[in-house]
Image: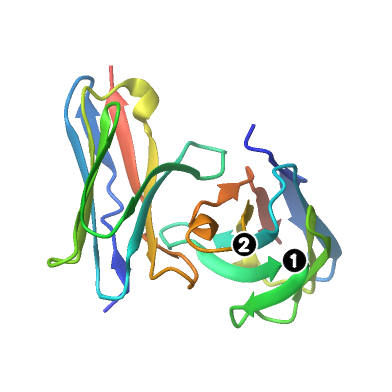
Amino acid sequence: ETGVTQTPRHLVMGMTNKKSLKCEQHLGHNAMYWYKQSAKKPLELMFVYNFKEQTENNSVPSRFSPECPNSSHLFLHLHTLQPEDSALYLCASSRRDPPAKNIQYFGAGTRLSVL
Amino acid sequence: QKEVEQDPGPLSVPEGAIVSLNCTYSNSAFQYFMWYRQYSRKGPELLMYTYSSGNKEDGRFTAQVDKSSKYISLFIRDSQPSDSATYLCAMNSGNTPLVFGKGTRLSVIA
């Protein structure tokens, strides 16, 4: 186990549904990240939170809404998604300051399928 | 030109072979270079971490960085079936987001 837990592991949703992805880290880190991993594409950074404050929003559509209530928990709220949003969504955590922030610990991901 | 280029493979080698995985990059400001390993149905895990140019060795794994050529490599000696995974290179200039390659899928055949 990496110390970063993501739930659910698999999610199938219709385009009109609303669902949430959850991430929890037990490593004492203070930075958390959401990434999107699609086939044949590099990992795409979506959001970064440092000490619960969002510091990076990588031009992500508003149908993805992150929430970070504390340094250990991160959510990704989903609504009115498109089929092209089907992908593996990875959560990661790290210490906040460079260069330690480069050492990111990933969860196993949520495999999302949008029908 | 993409910031980081990585051949996605797949790469298939016999057990015991030496494996060479590579990435090229375009941003000369990159100083930190990482290799992550991702097994099927798992998230990436950090395998090697290097700063600036040079070599770093950890067991059967050696990471090389050539900043003059903007080229990084990961060598796996005496490859094992358990090394079968996707290997992702990642890099940044320090206080910027990590930029990842597409990953190379490796299969080591017993």
Where is mark 2, residue-wise?
A: A96
Where is mark 1, residue-wise?
A: A51
Q: Amino acid at mark 1?
A: Phe
Up/down of B68 relative to A55, above or below: above
* Image quadrant occupied by the C terminus of chain B: top left
Residue A81 coordinates in the image, percent (x, y): 73, 71
Q: Nearer the viewer, residue A78 or A67?
A: A67
Badge 1 and badge 2 in a common chain: yes
Relative placement, left or right, of A36 versus A102 is: right
Which residue appears farthest toward the top when viewing the image? B110
Residue A41 coordinates in the image, percent (x, y): 43, 63
Give the residue at x 30% y 21%.
B80
Relative placement, left or right, of B41 versus B20 is: right
Work out whether mark 1 precedes mark 2 in sequence or the reverse, and give the earlier one: 1
Q: Amino acid at mark 2?
A: Arg
Q: Pointers 1 and 2 in contact (CB under 8 A)? A: yes
Mark 1 lies on a secondary structure that is loop
Q: Which mark is residue B33?
A: none
Give the residue at x 72% y 47%.
A28
Mark 2 lies on a secondary structure that is loop
Q: Alpha-carbon neighbours of circle 2 within 10 Å: few (<14), some, or many (≥20)? A: some
Relative placement, left or right, of A56 versus B24 is: right
- Chain of the residue displaying label 1: A
Q: Distance of mark 1 from mark 2, alpha carbons? A: 8 Å
Give the residue at x 43% y 68%.
B94
Among the 4 quarters of the image, the one containing residue A112: bottom right
